[in-house]
Image (cartoon, rainbow, N blue to C red):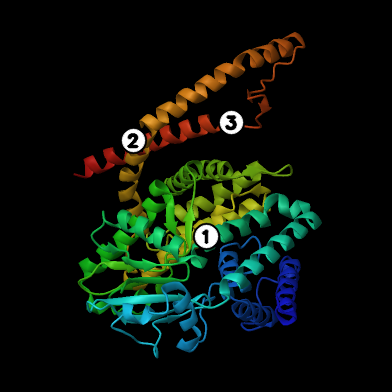
Amino acid sequence: MSVHRGRLLLRVLAQLVREEAAHALRPPAGEPDGPAVRRAREVRRALESLGPFYVKVGQMLATRPDIVTPEMIIEFERLQDEASPAPFRHFEPVLDQELGPGWARRFREIDTDNPLGTASLAQVYRAELPSGRPVAVKIQRPGVRETVGADMKLMGRLSRFAARRAPRFNEVIDIESMLNVVFDAMRPELDFVMEARNMTEAAKAAADFDYIAVPEVIDATGRVLVQSLAPGRPIREADRDAFTTEERKAIGQDLLAFMYRGYFVDRIFHADPHPGNIFVEPGHPATLIDWGMVGRIDRPMSTSILLLLLNLAMNDGAGTARAWIDMGSATSWANTSAFAGDMAALVPQIATASLEELNFGVTLTAVLQHSTRRGIRTSPMVSILGKSFANIEGSIRHLCPELSLIDVFSQELVGIVTDLVKESLSPQQAVRTALELITAGAAAPQQLRGVTRDLANRDLSMRMTLNGQRQPGRSAGLRDGAANVSMALATAMLWNHYAKDR
């Protein structure tokens, strides 16, 4: 890393620290373009100049009002992973190394003068195969993998240093874990073979939707990706009048439904579905491109998010608080009753909002702000989920602003819960349950001896152990079981509701 780059990074980090320190002291209103706004703009520009890794971190921070100020959030939401186009000759050595010296024979022609897209990681060119089929050729910028790798290592060291210096802050916001989520999501962007694998997996999921498509992978190496060309233009540039009302709504509904199933059923989702990554064209399905940044979540986290949204939709503040705490944990200084009170005040405002005004991405960040203040440690995955939620909803509003997000969620919930119930009744789950019972049975004698000793000492508190380790709360099995029961009940309620409507 150059001295200039290191100094720039330190300046950005120092500015973030100053903003956080001044957050509590800043008056609620100020000049439209005052010092705080100007400083936030400078930090955003510095992050853009530092490159893709820092752009992604800034985009994640845009969903964390508990960490950065409102001025920073506004600026970070404008972060775009864009770069000035480099001459094609800079990319020819990459093509030689990845596809061989005869790479040009793979294409009938390639437009080297007008890149389709330019980013700090890669440039994309329009080309034609010998058959005449149009394709997009994505080529990684020389040296970018090494630069991003060095940035990740540096930020990892800095996060561990910060954790040691601010243990109370790190107890509620695990900076290193949050960065690791970014690392995991970004790695396919540095290896196009991994991105191609994500695209193939996503294409299988998209096959169930009439208005969703994923580009076909033609060829992939670590630094070159050849894929089918997405028809149309980015959704942010789409002319709404060119589409019928029915087509616009169908595209929006399928985009939301596709993402919801990714969050809650497949547990792999597009982590960056911003308006530049969705192409639309009248008479064609919407095409989701750029599968380099993908989020993956486990079953308990996915179920907790689903329960959270269900509680929000049902105007249940206490249930929202419980679901949120289940996604993370309470710190030693947490005030869970105050957090439940916060949710009791916040949730009715959300539940009584018009359907068009309800934004799950914004809602997640609002809940996050309260939970951090009350000492609730939240899963690092919430940041990338919030980013994905906010991006897909913002993208859809470009084409179909009147779409009811809560209606789509309610419609999809029945199918989602049905799939979850089937999963719970699968042979694999039956084997897992049997193994858990066997393990619990093996630990029973030790538990019984402990209970007998406690009773003899007149200590009536129960200590549940698993494999000899003390558990601070409910077991994962009990939580999963409660979640499955809740989902089944939700399905029955919704089914009854729709049956009455018919």
Tag 2's secondary structure? Answer: helix
Residue 174 on image: x %, y %: 67, 53
Q: Residue at x 58, y 60 (%)?
A: 183
Q: Report the residue marked by disc 1.
A: 185
Marks 3/1: CA–CA distance = 30 Å
Give the mark, 3 or 2, whose residue is nearer the N terminus: 2
3D distance between C-alphas at marks 2 and 1: 29 Å
Q: Between label 3 and label 1, give the one nearer the viewer.
A: 1
Residue 380 in view in this figure: yes
x, y percent for residue 169 = 73, 55
x, y percentage for residue 52?
56, 73
Q: Earlier in the sequence, mark 2 or mark 1?
A: 1
Tell me the kind of residue under disc 1.
Ala
User: Do labels 3 and 1 touch, CB within 8 Å?
Assistant: no
What secondary structure is found at the residue carrying circle 3?
loop
Q: Residue at x 57, y 70 (%)?
A: 145
Q: CA distance from mark 3 to mark 2?
A: 24 Å
**Residues packed near mark 1 inside 10 Å, few (<14), some (14 to 19) or many (20 plus):** many
Using the image, tell me which numbered label, if any, was put on residue 422.
2
What number is the disc on residue 474?
3
Q: Amino acid at mark 2?
A: Lys
The tag earlier along the polypeptide, 3 or 1, is 1
